[in-house]
Image (cartoon, rainbow, N blue to C red):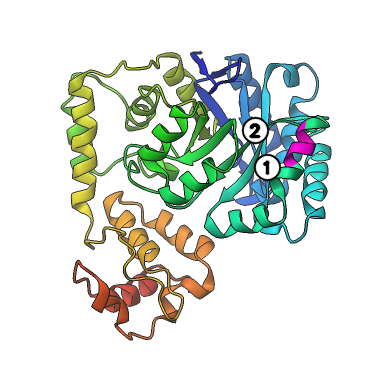
């Protein structure tokens, strides 16, 4: 296993971190972890040197923290750092901070959470928890030892990321980042900005939720032109590890084989190890993926807010992703499970206000209707 500096802390983290939100489950029920196989995966990863486990309050319908806690209780707890997250969307009043942290300590069977994150911050959730005094509360939790280090995970635009990062002396943060998302959310600008401040940067969605695995034929042909032979997953991971600003890369693994493959990838990782040819190959693949998109949306945001609440950029992005990555089932899941009802395409009344603002002249109303008809669960 390779290890990397964790921001400005005097501790080294494994290049691969274990994301605890995609354990194998029973009967396709995400709330029923296949504990025998999941424990085997955790033990194997830790035995191979993985020393950072990342879970959260809602993972596996609230079962992940409890499973992780009891599985690593004892000698394995001493070998790893535990990370979990405050469910900011559930916070309604100041007392909720202690309510959830204390519940998480009980679930994890530990007296201290090594790395505690404010979960999934965006502009609105940050303003809410900041107004309720989350930073003053966190300082108390740091002093009394319930948490050892404070950070946040993030899903919004770069300027919001910068605002949050500048608001406190964070020790680490967690962002979505992969070779396709260099300009998405915090993106590469956020990675560099945090690293320059000495803040550790944890990477989530390195494979874009699995979309970068098993690429369409025309994409695989580009990978195959390289003299360096890797799987598409290994290309994606190695591209991240090549960057010195990356602290560790989380992978949500569902089989022991996934763990073994990712551990092997991490063991061969290195900072600034890519050749110019390899960097060019990745750029070529990125461009080829982008050229597969049918809707010329640049996510400029001019079309929002929609008077009816439709999340236009997100819906157009879901459709493009389904075509680019040839992953229709992923798009179905995202549309039906993660897009709020008020933001779905059936709320569009074809007022065309968005089309008047769109610099790409996209026939948005037609696309939104098609997207809903394509992905909405019957």
Residue range (magenta): 138-142
Name which residue lies at 40% across and 76% down. Answer: 306
Q: Give percent across and percent down for residue 226.
A: 18, 24
Q: Secondary structure at mark 1?
A: strand
| Residue at 18% from the left image edge and 29% from the top image edge | 280
Q: Is residue 140 magenta?
A: yes
**Circle 2 residue:** 38
Q: Sequence-wise, which precedes: disc 2 or disc 1? A: 1
Occupied quadrant, residue 273? top left
At x 35% / y 40%, what residue is drawn?
212
Residue 147 spot, x, y in % from top left = 75, 32
Is residue 279 found left or right of 15 in the rendered image? left
Q: Nearer the viewer, residue 203 or 337?
A: 203
Query: How far across and how far down the image is residue 15, in percent?
Result: 49, 21
Residue that badge 1 annotates: 33
Type of secondary structure dominating the magenta stretch: helix
Is residue 73 shown left or right of residue 213? right
The spot of residue 207 in percent (x, y) is 41, 38
| Identity of the residue drawn at 55% across and 21% down | 8
Q: Is residue 242 above or below residue 54?
A: above
Instruction: Provide the secondary structure element on which disc 2 rests.
Output: helix
């Amino acid at each position: 296993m390779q290890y990397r500096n964790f921001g400005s802390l005097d501790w080294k983290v494994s290049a691969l971190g274990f994301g605890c939100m995609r354990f194998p489950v029973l009967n396709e029920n995400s709330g029923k972890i296949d504990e025998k196989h999941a424990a085997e995966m955790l033990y194997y990863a830790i035995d191979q040197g993985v020393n950072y486990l990342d879970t959260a309050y809602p993972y596996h319908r609230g079962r992940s923290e409890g499973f992780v806690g009891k599985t690593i209780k004892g000698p394995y707890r001493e070998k790893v750092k535990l990370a979990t997250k405050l469910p900011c969307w559930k916070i309604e009043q100041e007392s909720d901070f202690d309510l959830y942290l204390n519940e998480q300590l009980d679930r994890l069977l530990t007296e201290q959470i090594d790395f505690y994150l404010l979960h999934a911050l965006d502009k609105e959730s940050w303003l809410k928890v900041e107004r309720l005094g989350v930073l003053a509360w966190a300082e108390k939790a740091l002093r009394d030892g319930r948490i050892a280090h404070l950070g946040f995970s993030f899903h919004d635009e770069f300027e919001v990321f910068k605002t949050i990062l500048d608001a406190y002396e964070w020790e680490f943060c967690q962002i979505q980042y992969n070779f396709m998302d260099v300009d998405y959310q915090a993106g590469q600008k956020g990675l560099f900005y945090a690293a320059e401040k000495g803040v550790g940067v944890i990477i989530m969605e390195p494979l874009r939720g699995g979309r970068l695995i098993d690429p369409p034929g025309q994409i695989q042909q580009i990978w195959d032109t390289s003299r360096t032979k890797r799987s598409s997953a290994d290309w994606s991971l190695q591209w991240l590890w090549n960057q010195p600003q990356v602290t560790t890369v989380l992978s949500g693994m569902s089989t022991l084989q996934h763990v073994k493959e990712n551990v092997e990838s991490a063991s061969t990782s290195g900072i600034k190890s890519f050749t110019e040819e390899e960097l060019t190959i990745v750029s070529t693949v990125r461009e080829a993926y982008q050229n597969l998109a049918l809707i010329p949306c640049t996510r400029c945001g001019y079309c929002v807010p929609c008077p009816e609440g439709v999340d236009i950029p997100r819906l157009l992005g879901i459709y493009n992703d389904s075509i680019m990555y040839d992953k229709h089932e992923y798009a179905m899941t995202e549309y039906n499970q993660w897009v709020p009802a008020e933001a779905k395409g059936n709320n569009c009344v074809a007022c065309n206000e968005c089309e008047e603002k769109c610099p790409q002249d996209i026939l948005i109303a037609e696309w939104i209707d098609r997207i809903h008809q394509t992905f909405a669960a019957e």
